[in-house]
Image: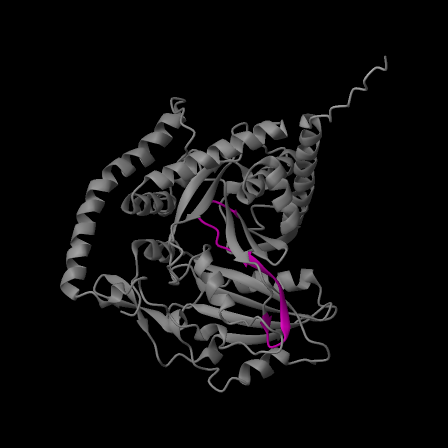
Amino acid sequence: MDKELTLLDLAFLVLESRVQTGHVGGLALFALPDNVGEGFFQRVVESHHDWRQARGVFKLKLQRTGIKPGWVADDTTDAATHIQYLALPRPGSRQQLYALVERLHAQPLDRHHPLWEAAFIERIEGGRGALYIKIHHALVDGISAVRTILQSFSTSPHVPPPHLLWQTELPSARPGGADDRSSLLASLEKFQSSLRSMATVAPVFAQETVRPLLHGIGLDHETALSSFMAPRSILNRQITSRRQFASHEFSIQEVTTVAKAAGCTLNDVVLMVCASALRRYLAEHDALPQAPLVTWMPISTRSKEDQRPSNQVTMACVSLATDIADPLQRFRAIQASTTAAKQEVATRSREATEWATLLRGGWPILTDLLGVSNLLPPAANLTISNVPGITKDFYFHGAKLEGIYPLSALVGTMGLNITLLSCGDTLAVGLLACPDTIPALDTLAAYLGDAFSEFQQLFSSQQKATAVPAKSKRRKRRM
């Protein structure tokens, strides 16, 4: 096997069904060079003499060995069968682009071949072009997907990229030369890891099952949350195979400024803005639950040295405090829930974290397969993910990257996913939903902007209210 298939990777494969795909995607938008004419992308791709050759994760395909599938390298992979060149009809609006991407993203990947596809799209208004890429979540998580994409761009408009997207090589399996260990030592470490896992899974299993039961009867008073502690909402109806995409953009500088004023992280701002927008959206549909919405929030468990394209992420459950009308109190409640979730992850061992991730992701899949999901509370109401992005300019054969809009996956009965990715000074928000369960996604996207303005005003007024007036100098009385 050329890449280990972990239990978490396997979970992303198992969750796939007729209506639920397991891939993640991204829409990279470029400002094309002047006067390049149509066919730009195909010309520059085929200018690479080995453009048909796939490398790394892009040539891995599933192969069953015994009862467990695994990844094997397929050296016969022809990249030409995985890419296509498309052009929008005039005028090439954003709405037309998103309609095309929605159809591409709704289609599952063929498991008989390496699990990725790419589409280069031209004739977008304003002299723009785009690259839509999708790859199975069993191969990469959000951070490794972004790193893989960026390796195929250059930092100068005058220098071509070192290689094409599907030619990014796999780094070594583990940092520090772990691949050089003897097979005996590796086997012993796996055995020890199995023993530790057995000792770890019992308390994690108890926590992930007992906590929701106590919550259901009103006896759970912890700030930290688990799956199946979310209220029923219109966000959690049975999804279909159709997908709808919407986007919004924020200025990173403005988000950073308000985060500093609020004394919080950028991620806290993101959660608060999403919570406020969702509260307004659900209230207008007369569908705001009395209990607070709960979001799945991915937290990376990857070390800074680890560059492998793999899944190294756990899933935290965070309250969005949508039951609280006062925005400042809502924000403090979200902060408290986020802090509790992060502390819980930080205090767990790696084995415990992996098991908690599998349980939180596995229970919704199991209940859906058994047909009992309607008898239980939702595992969560939605997913909100903030993926670290890009701080410098990137180019593809002179075309400047303007932004990457993420398109993630819908899980179980969670019909909405909001993923954010920064590029330069732009924080791009990708909203993915099932249009048969969540109406007017564009309206929700617009409410994000209103919610951010409200948050800015909240802390602008807070700063003014708490500002200490300058002391006036007292004049000495003349004698």
- Is 206 on the left-hand or right-hand side of 418? left
So how many labels did they put on this image? 0
Query: Which quadrant of the view contains residue 184?
Result: bottom left
Closest to the observer, 322 or 393: 393
Q: Quadrant of the N terminus?
A: bottom left
Q: Is residue 267 magenta?
A: no
Q: Position of residue 256 (x, y in %)?
A: 61, 46
Query: Which quadrant of the view contains residue 262?
Result: top right
Q: Where is residue 62 in the image (x, y as percent from the top left)?
A: 33, 68
Furthest toward the right, the residue is: 478
Closest to the observer, 108 or 461: 461
Q: Is residue 400 magenta?
A: yes
Visible residue check, residue 214:
yes
Q: Position of residue 70 (x, y in %)?
A: 29, 65
Closest to the observer, 471 or 293: 471
Q: Which colour scheme is used?
A: one colour
- Is 104 on the left-hand or right-hand side of 5? right
Residue drawn 33% across the image and 57% down it: 10
Visible residue check, residue 292:
no
208 lies above or below 311:
above
- Is 194 on the left-hand or right-hand side of 30? left
Q: In which quarter of the image is the C terminus?
A: top right
Closest to the observer, 101 or 386: 386
Residue drawn 15% across the image and 57% down it: 188
Furthest toward the top, the residue is: 479
Q: Position of residue 477 (x, y in %)?
A: 83, 15
Residue drawn 68% across the image and 76% down it: 33
Q: Give the range drawn in magenta.
A: 395-416
Furthest toward the bottom, the residue is: 49
320 lies above or below 309:
above
